[in-house]
Every structure is written in structure tokens, then in C-alpha cells.
Image (tube, rainbow, N blue to C red):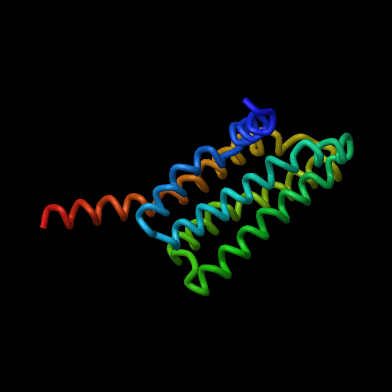
Amino acid sequence: MPEWFLYFVSILSKSWVLILSPAILLFFIFKDYLALRFAAITAAFFLFGTLTYSSLMAFDDGIYVYRYLVWALTDITWMALIAYWGLKDKVHLWQCELGQLVVIGAPILQLFRLVDRHLWDLSYSTVMYQTFMPLINIATVVVCYLPLLYIFVNNRNKALS
């Protein structure tokens, strides 16, 4: 295998993009472009996080400030873009709202972690951070897949009619 291909596969295996790829493909096949746009932008943000992780950690080694600010700003940027697209009917409004409700905890948790580690020099946030951040990411992926339920139920009802 070419080295660039192995590198690409290793990036995908470290990211939620690999898990979102079937949703993106299915939304394209079923021509649900609103859900496709939501899943694709979410995958792009997950990919951005994966690509910048190692350089951000190296830059912020021992400081523990910039990583949490960058991650919080990334989440807020995702939320702003999804909200804008929801208002402009570029994504499903219900999916936009549900995504906002799921992800709102991430920047709050990132900023609490920053204050906890840097200013207070405590570790109250460690267990919360290690527990809730993966749950927020999983819930975000689930929100990306939710339109498939509507598609399959709608197709089933049409077949029964």
C-alpha cells in the first residue's frame, strides 16, 4: 500500500469520521442533502480535531491553556455554523437544535477544565472530562444518524401502503 493511503487510514481510524462515513454515503444515496450536510460538516470538524491534535498538544505541552481554548472555539464554531445553516434551511432544523443541545456541554466542559487545571490547580474536572467528552462525541454521532430512522420508517410505511 502507498504510504499516503496508510497515513489517511490511520487518521480515519483515530477519528469519528470513519464511523460517520456510512451515514454520509447513505444520505447521498437517499438524496437527503440536509442530513448529508449536517453529517459532512460534523465529520469535517472531527477530522480537523484529529489533524490538529498532535501539533496542538506539542505546542501546549505543560501549559494546558491553548488546547482547551482551541477545542472550545472549535465546538462553538461548529455550533454557530450549524445554527446558521439551520436558520437558512440548509440542515434539518430539528437536527440542528438537537445537535446544539448535545454539543453545548463540550465548550462549557472545556472551559471548566481550563479553569480547573490552570487557575485553580485542582483536578475536579478530570473524571467529568474523561466521562462526558466521549459521551458528547458519541451523542453527536448519533444525532448525525437520526435522519436514517426517518428514512427507513418512511420507506417502510410506503411499502406497507
- Specify the quadrant of the image occupied by residue 119: top right
Q: Quadrant of residue 124?
A: top right
Q: Position of residue 8 (x, y in %)?
A: 64, 35
Direction from residue 40 to residue 53 in the image, left or right: right
The image quarter in which residue 77 lies: bottom right
| 134 sits left or right of 27 in the view | right
Q: Quadrant of the N terminus?
A: top right
Instruction: Check the picture and name the quadrant holding the C terminus.
Output: bottom left
Q: Is residue 46 left or right of residue 154?
A: right
The residue at the point 61 percent across, 50 percent down is 44
Q: Residue at x 75, y 43 (%)?
A: 52
Number of callouts: 0
108 vs 9: above or below = below
**Residue 40 percent across, percent down from the top left:** 54, 53
The residue shown at (56%, 40%) is: 16
Given residues 156 and 140, the one toward you in this image is: 156
Task: Determine the residue located farthest toward the left in the rendered image.
Answer: 161
Residue found at the very far bottom of the displayed protein: 88
Q: Is residue 78 above or below residue 24?
A: below
Q: Position of residue 120 (x, y in %)?
A: 84, 42
Q: Can you give x and y, in whole percent of width and height, for residue 22 in the image? A: 44, 42
Picture layout, residue 11 above or below residue 48:
above
Residue extending farthest to the top is 1
In the visual, does 58 lie left or right of 9? right
